[in-house]
Amino acid sequence: MDALLPALLGLRPRGPSRAALTARLGGRVVVVTGASRGIGAEVAGRFARVGARLVLLARDEGALEAVAAGIRRRGGEAAVLAVDLRDTAAATAAADRILAEFGAPELVVSNAGHSIHRAVLDSAERAHDVTRTAGVNYLGPVALLLRLLPAMAAAGRGQVIATSSTIVDIPAAGWSAYAGSKAAFEGWLRAAAPELARHGVALTSLHLPLVRTAMSAATPAYRDAPALRPVDAAKLVARAVVRRTRLWSPWWSRAAGAALQAFPALADGALDGWERRLARDAGAGPGAGAAPDAGSGASEAAPR
């Protein structure tokens, strides 16, 4: 039963064949943000094994170098570029450097992210939380892509895959800053997708649920909850490369999202109750605590 439930919830996906992934990425430039650990590091390792030429981005240069060194030891190719995506000028400069040194990428995996758990009523003096979260989850990724996408379109090929969150489908109490930033990037991708499709560039959004990491295990409410593992998330990314999927979301998240669109207040009680449980588990009042998610390398304590 322990293995059956994650499978029923779509949390144990099958990845594409090695041959199919090699045909798409072998010898081609792949940019992965948030690559220093978690999902990003797992994706980088998987793509290195099929011969992708990796450019790894994150804030922590030391952690990035460790990931790259592991790839090189196994015969892969990986370059590192330390950048804080909260700084849009730095994100733009990073994109310019990528184009100058590697050319237009075949694939950009926009995985860097920051999550924060804090109730609205506890945030009166913390507007900077919204700014920081929006910087990593929306403004920085867009600044990076605004430079890379014209080169990809000129090449007539390419793909962007964003590791988003089921919070886009099911907005969760206590995560308003995180949900807002993820929804903003989702809206940008959806609006840009038709423009870029005619140039051969696909935009993909993956609505990931809880991902099992050491940080999420520290939250009792999440410790035993069904979850993806980083390797499962990497399989979903790889599958999206081969299928050029526009959107992936677990069936239960799509169903809940549709119900909430029709009846917006339907789950208010349940979502608020879950928020109160998280606050009790944290040993503080509602909304205490914040942590970066696995995209930027630390926590999946958010609903993705």
Image: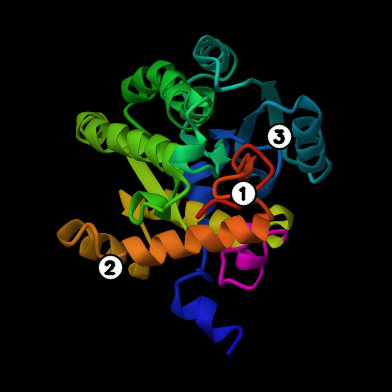
Residue type for callout 3: Glu
Say which of 111 and 200 sits in front: 111
Let me know if residue 16 appears in the view: no
Please give the residue where the numbered disc 3 appears in the rendered image: 77
Mark 1 or mark 2, earlier in chain: 1
Quadrant of the image occupied by residue 190: top left
Spatial CA span between label 2 and label 3: 41 Å
> Mark 3 or mark 1, which is nearer to you?
1
Residue name at image x 70 percent, y 62 percent = 217
Secondary structure of the residue carrying tag 3 is: strand
Say which of 83 and 127 sits in front: 127
Q: Main secondary structure of the magenta part?
A: loop
Let me know if residue 21 appears in the view: yes
Please give the residue where the numbered disc 2 appears in the rendered image: 255
Residue 203 shown left or right of residue 28 in the figure:
left
Residue type for callout 1: Ile
Q: Which residues are magenta?
A: 218-230
> Mark 2 or mark 3, which is nearer to you?
2
Residue farthest left in this picture: 262
x and y percentages locating residue 276 in the rendered image: 52, 59
x and y percentages locating residue 124 in the rendered image: 47, 29
x and y percentages locating residue 226 in the rendered image: 56, 72
Residue type for callout 2: Ala
Residue 222 part of the magenta segment: yes
x and y percentages locating residue 151 in the rendered image: 39, 18
Residue 298 shown left or right of residue 73 in the figure:
left
Local crowd at mark 2 within 10 Å, few (<14), some, or many (≥20)?
some
Spatial CA span between label 3 and label 1: 19 Å
Please give the residue where the numbered disc 1 appears in the rendered image: 39
Say which of 251 and 121 sits in front: 121
Residue name at image x 44 percent, y 46 percent = 164
